[in-house]
Image (spheres, helix red, strand yellow):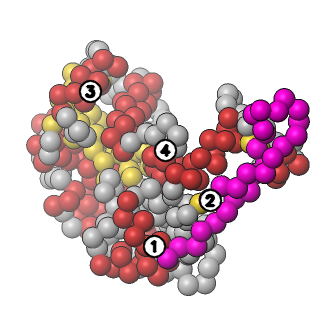
Amino acid sequence: MEAESVLPKWGSEPCIMGIDEAGRGPVLGPMVYGCLYCPLSYENTLASLDFADSKTLKEEKREELFENLKADESIGWAVDVIDPRELSAKMLKKNKINLNEISHNSAIGLVRRALNTGVLLTEVYVDTVGDPEKYRTKLSDIFPSIKFVVAKKADSLYPVVSGASIVAKVTRDRALRNWVFDESTENMQRNFGSGYPGDPQTKVWLEHHKHTVFGFPTLVRFSWGTCNSYFKDGIEVLWEADATDEDDSSVKTRKKQLKLSSVGFTGMKRSSEEIESSGKGRCKFFQARKLEQLSKF
């Protein structure tokens, strides 16, 4: 998460905050939550700064507005960039965390970060995820001293949310432009389009960059259902683990094979992780190196 780490000189005045996201729907790249906050007394001025829903603005205009708000001493901002690997891991883990909950947690984190810095938030405006009233109640229960307004299309209704929308969108666009691939294959290309599943350019990129054994590059949110269709011809992989025989109290182990059929994003892979985390099965790699799983840090 990136933000100003010091309390602005106006931070002890009553302040408002807007929160919005960018990249919720794409199959590629991070999801970014952004916030913008300022003194309540600056609200009218904020409305004159030409902020609008970032989706209605051209990239050049978004970049210009972002640089303007960064230079404005009466405005604070922060972002939470959620890596595609983190999104997939949370959505596929044993106790799944769905996208709505991930979104809620990110917004809550942005509010908490501003409060921890010392900003006196009195009103927060949020573009809704899910039912607006349930979301508002959830936020109010966590932060009872703050008035929350949660609405659909809040980024087109409230300038403070429009500003947050620009913060989030520009941050995601820059993250994609500057993405450093972990993979070193020679044929890696960057012309992946918008990243939305329906984008023809994105579809071509996904088809070109799939691997029948190793799946997709880490730019891809492999938990998205749209990925499954690309691996109908994927190679089945058998993972071998040492699993303790539950019926035998001795240290004897038995071999157990676990099948991963859809290249990195099926329940079978999670079953393997569940066995390991339960202590009933330990891969030889970890046993040989005396590596233990930590649940508390």
Residue that carries the numbered disc 2 in the rendered image: 259
Residue that carries the numbered disc 1 in the rendered image: 232
**CA gap, disc 2 to disc 1?**
15 Å
Q: Earlier in the sequence, mark 3 or mark 4?
A: 3
Residue that carries the numbered disc 3 in the rendered image: 15
Whether residue 126 is visible? yes
Quadrant in the rendering for residue 33: top left
Residue that carries the numbered disc 4 in the rendered image: 90
Secondary structure beneath disc 4?
helix
Give the number of the mark in front: 3 or 2. 2
Quadrant in the rendering for residue 56: bottom left
Secondary structure beneath disc 3?
strand
Magenta extent: 233-259
Q: Earlier in the sequence, mark 2 or mark 4?
A: 4
Disc 2 residue crowd, few under 14, some 14–19, many 20+, Cα 10 Å = some
Image spot of residue 259 (x, y percent): 62, 59
Q: Earlier in the sequence, mark 1 or mark 4?
A: 4
Q: Earlier in the sequence, mark 2 or mark 1?
A: 1
**CA gap, disc 3 to disc 1?**
53 Å
